[in-house]
Image (spheres, rainbow, N blue to C red):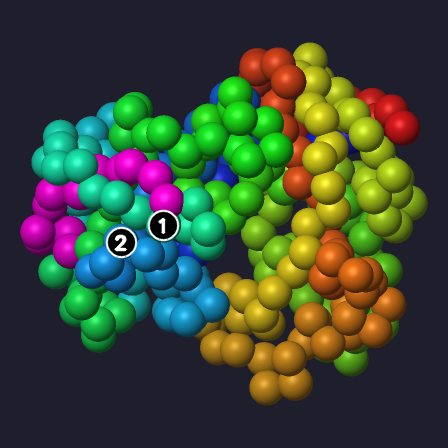
Amino acid sequence: MHLSALYHYPLKSCRGNALATAQVTEAGLEADRQWMVTHPDGSFVTGREQPRLVLIEATPGAFGLRLTAPGMPAFEVDVSRFATPWQTRVWADTFDALRGDKAADDWFSDYLGIPVHLAYIGAASNRVLRTAPGIRFAFADGYPYLLISDASLTDLNGRLRVPVAMGRFRPNLVVTGCTAFAEDGWRHVRIGTVEFEVVKPCDRCVFTTIDPQTGVPDPGQQPLRTLGSYRRTDAGVMFGVNLIARTTGRLTLGDQVVPSV
């Protein structure tokens, strides 16, 4: 069993970047979900309500973030401009972040057609996991890491009229060499030299129905409708598992994956 794909999403809900190697931190893969679009009241904006966010390509660099999007000029975000404390909200979590670049706010507002701000997590964020209060993380929905096996996607695609790509599910880690949904039963997993704890299955939402290549929702609510027919529990429709890192280190494609139950 081995690590077959790595992804990070520097801007929450943006297009994923495929990586050959990545540094594991407590808060997630390096540069993952360090930036987020918010409403004027600080609440988060995601692809669930603004599907065109998935068409934005966000590339982290030494001084900030480079953004490109259909119909928009490329924009360079300078992290040094983000110094104003800004209280943000992701679901039930309210926590501190930073804002300050009006030009970045205007770029996103023009693209989405609504007034928004760009927030940066910064080094002083006080957001911690509810289930593990010692672990700090950034703008991910609930946990720093999401893992899915190739076999689980193959099982789902065997039930769909039109197969979908792994990008629908926005994982950080993809593994190859196990049976479908084997990850549901794991409690810990070592990838290369890094130890992870499997916290819970990941419940999926309408975001999975948005094609990441076009930003268009599927009219038949696929693949969520099919997933719901055989992966529904009392906690929701499950696909993939949420992880927290118990050690740090570097992951590289091809790393051995060793789970334990």
x and y percent of residue 85 in the render? 17, 37
Magenta-tinted stretch = 94-105
Q: Earlier in the sequence, mark 1 or mark 2?
A: 2
Q: Which residue is mark 2?
A: 42
Left or right, 11 with reference to 197 = left
Residues at marks 1 and 2 touching, judged by CB atoms closer than 8 Å:
yes
Examine the rendered structure and indicate whether residue 130 appears above or below residue 237: above
Residue at left offset 47%, top offset 68%: 48
Residue at left offset 48%, top offset 44%: 140
Examine the rendered structure and indicate whether residue 150 appears above or below residue 30: below
What residue occupies the far bottom of the structure in this picture?
A: 219
Locate residue 154: give its quadrant.
Answer: bottom right
Q: If the image is split into quadrants, where does the N terminus sit? A: top right
Q: Please name whichever residue, 223 or 90, is drawn nearer the observer in this view of the structure.
A: 90
Q: Is residue 202 magenta?
A: no
Left or right, 113 with reference to 247 = left
Is residue 61 visible in this depiction of the protein?
no
x and y percent of residue 148 in the render? 72, 45
Q: Mark 1 falls on what kind of element?
A: strand
Q: Mark 2 falls on what kind of element?
A: loop
Q: Which residue is mark 1?
A: 89
Q: If the image is split into quadrants, where does the C terminus sit? A: top right
